[in-house]
Image (cartoon, helix red, strand yellow):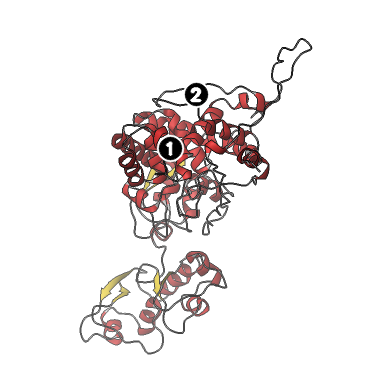
Amino acid sequence: MSIRKRTGKILALVSPVFLLAAGCSTTHTGSADTSGPVAMTVTPPAIPSPPPNQIAKPPVTIAKSAAGTALPPSSTLSVAPKPLEKPFFMRVPDDPSIEWYDTYFQTVARNHFALWLSRSTEYLPMMKSVFREEGLPEDLVYLSLIESGFSPRAYSYSRAAGLWQFMRGTGRKYGLRINAWIDQRRDPVLSTRAAAKYLKDLYTEFHSWSLALAAYNAGEGKVANAVADTGTKDYWEIRNSNTLSNETKDYVPKFLAAVRIAKDPSRYGFNNIDYRSPLETETATLQHPAEIRVLAKAAGVSIRKFREMNPEFTRWATPPHMAPISLNIPMGKKEDFLANISRLPHMSRRDLYADVDGGVHTIRPGESLWTIARRYHVSMQALMNANGLSSSSVIHTGKRINIPVSSYASNRYRHVRGHGGSGHWMRHRIRRGESLFALAKRFRTTISAIRSKNHLFGRTYLREGQMIMVPAR
């Protein structure tokens, strides 16, 4: 069978579930509607990327009148492609791969592309505003379409995340915080600002938007090596060599096809799209850690809505030892939000973590989730939610897990007030020769109160330099 016959069947064989950039982006599976841990998106199979010189253009049947003249086209596939605008590309050749992706997005990927278009209006106004401020061409915002389908929760097998599919190293390089509690690659505003700066740096390095986009996909080093090996800075000439992967070779054609359709969707048959409302938020700065449910209540929105505005928070609270932290709240609610936060009880704003080590417990030999939950008087479910675990998870000696305060704090504070003190405790560093008896006498409390406050059970030996909680005098 000839190459033309084999490749002519590509569209019929491709699965409709796909990924636009292999190893870089995903489709969205929905937002979390609780204050528990957020599950990461599962990456679907990759979009096909056949060599352009082996792709036969899809046949178009041209109807003719009795006189032999061609009739106007009557289907989406027979629409003449709209000429590509060239606001920032020096040269866009008549490459068959661009037309191939045009057809692919209109046929096999039609449902997915329609979903991405519906999401686009939620973020495009904000993205275009940021890119204008950074002095970048506005059409570059459609890079998010082929990277993530405009989904801030998109997560790839290569561990790229967010609207712009940043890897951890690149995200941190451009100021995004990433740890077990927060992943600002998912923050729509902060990640867009970081993407704009990254694209600007790439253009400064290569002086070509085509090469800058290729470097965004493959990395600066690979594109720089390709330029050195071929001796040219023309992306379309480099594309004909073997210095770039097939994915990177098709990245710019894929982007151009997506831009062409996204800017004029009705021309390509994308009608009756249920577009989402634009994201209307403003940034507020939080000076102390707080639970997500508390922040949602202070902002006057549901937990689900707050998480939609702040997909960067991956657990039930903001990071315990990271302040200040920025978050997105509804437009016009900043003053009310800050006022509500300031009126909350002290414990709701700051006292989120249970023990003297900032809410972190180091697993000891023989311990299980059940024994740890019992020790700290929290439920098993709360403990698993706080650490992204399930009932079948295996814990290992020496690992550190977080202890939530949701159900424990009330018991702890009730116990403290019951001993006749002021209800306030402070940290104390153990000195040489000190014992529980000496501390109880010095701080006018009982040994059992100190034991309970610091979770000291059985035979406990105090170590010089150890930090424990004692009543404030």
Left or right side of 100 for 464: left
Q: Residue furthest top?
A: 67
Percent position (x, y) of residue 91?
41, 25
Residue in front for this viewpoint, 135 or 409:
135
Left or right side of 433 for 344: right
Question: What residue lies at 38% left-to-right and 54% top-to-bottom?
Answer: 178
Quadrant of the rendered image containing residue 271: top right
Q: Residue furthest bottom?
A: 459
Percent position (x, y) of residue 29?
59, 50
Give the CA separation, mark 1 to mark 2.
19 Å
Residue in front for this viewpoint, 285 or 473:
285
Secondary structure under tag 2 reads loop
Mark 1 or mark 2, earlier in chain: 2
Q: Is residue 335 visible?
A: no
Question: What residue lies at 50% left-to-right and 51% top-to-bottom?
Answer: 155
Q: Is residue 376 above or below residue 180?
A: below
Question: What residue lies at 37% left-to-right and 49% top-to-bottom?
Answer: 171
Residue in front for this viewpoint, 33 or 416:
33
Q: Is residue 20 above or below residue 403?
A: above
Question: What residue lies at 61% left-to-right and 36% top-to-bottom?
Answer: 104
The kind of residue tagged 1 is Arg
**Residue that numbered label 2 is attached to:** 84
Dot 1, crowdedness within 10 Å: few (<14), some or many (≥20)? some
Q: Is residue 35 above or below residue 418?
A: above
Q: Residue furthest right?
A: 66
Q: Is residue 336 above or below residue 444?
A: above
Q: Is residue 138 visible?
A: yes
Marks 1, 2: nearer the viewer: 1
Dot 2, crowdedness within 10 Å: few (<14), some or many (≥20)? some
**Residue that numbered label 1 is attached to:** 239
